[in-house]
Amino acid sequence: MKAVKRIAGSTAAFIKKIWMQKQGRIGLILLTLLALVAVFAPLIAPYDPYDVAQRADKGLAPSLEHPLGTSITTGQDVFSMLIYGTRVSLLVGLITGISIALLGSVLGVAAGYLGGITDMLLMRIVDVMIVIPTLPLTILITNVFGKSYVVIVLVFVLFGWTGLARTVRSLVLRLKNADYVKSAELAGAGRWYIMKTHILPSVSHLVIMSTALSCAGIMIAEAGLSFLGLGNPTAISWGKMLAEAQSGGSMLFGQWWTIIAPGIGIFISVFAFMRIGLAIEGILNPGMKGKNGMNKLIKHMGNRYLDEVLSSMEDAE
């Protein structure tokens, strides 16, 4: 219980530090607005995009009745789809990012501090996971177990924890030789107590930064999978909106707003998480230059799984 309170207090103090930075403040404000839109979607959206009775003619241009027009395939109000799509895209990003952070940090701490057979076994699993062709396996898993967002989140977590676990392990290898850890060991504290009380809080800042960056990358990956037709067909997401616009030939018929709307939603969400990630990196490394930080962020987000999804989107086009 004390460890939980300690982590919660450290997290609250760290969020306050993020707010004190300009980039972090922008990211937190945008993320809060997106969360409010997702929570109050039924009150904000003029129509219910899931209600077949609230659909108009297909491919209507923007008007006062339909601010962003209607979809070219089903006649749904695009603005309402954009609002409701915030729920799915943001929820998948947050749940997956937090799950990856929890799994990666726990396994990374265990591998780094326990060492021996535990370290060897976990790192060999990481090596195997890295060489697995993730996108073909994702297609296979979704075809076998269904295209629900539960399955998609589990797939993202399955392939997403390895990088964080390896990074946390390298940091723990240095932390376990720190004086306060050695003092706890000499005092007779158990391994699990030391890991949850001393080691895990010490890597919490790194985990928070990784969570912010992972959420941004996962939202892009979810949009990519939905664009490829691997998302949940019964739910509305920004990626599904792009897929329907592309399959219906929106650009061919001049319905550009059906593509711009979800694109802006994805951009704002990713931009918010990127601002938070850059602010956290600035806190952890005060001497960081803005340009270098952006390059590091792009390199971090340019993981193999995301590259495969994006390249597949280009092939689909």
Image (spheres, rainbow, N blue to C red):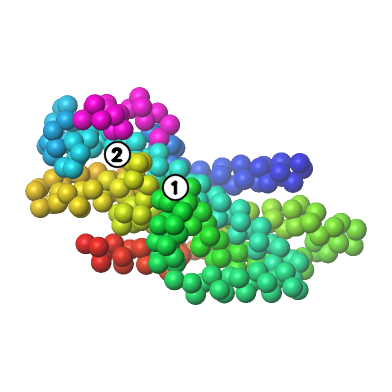
For residue 314, what is the image quadrant?
bottom left
In the rendered image of this protein, does residue 196 appear above or below residue 87? below
Q: Is residue 54 magenta?
A: yes
At numbered mark 2, what does the secondary structure look like: helix, strand or loop? helix
Q: Nearer the viewer, residue 299 or 161?
A: 161
Dot placed on the residue nearer the N-terminal end, 2 or 1: 2
Dot 2 crowding, Cα within 10 Å, few <14, some 14–19, many 20+: many
* Residue located at (39% from left, 53% from top): 222
- Range drawn in magenta: 38-55
At numbered mark 1, what does the secondary structure look like: helix, strand or loop? helix
* Residue located at (61% from left, 70% from top): 125
In the rendered image of this protein, does residue 270 appear above or below residue 2? below
| Outermost top residue | 43
Q: Position of residue 215 (x, y in %)?
A: 46, 52
Q: Nearer the viewer, residue 228 or 162?
A: 228
Amino acid on which disc 1 is placed? Tyr
* Residue located at (79% from left, 56% from top): 192
In the rendered image of this protein, does residue 82 appear above or below residue 192? above
Q: Which residue matches tag 2?
A: 82
| Outermost right residue | 187
* Residue located at (72% from left, 69% from top): 118
Q: Locate the N terminus and report the quarter of the image it occupies.
A: top right
Q: Which residue matches tag 1?
A: 149
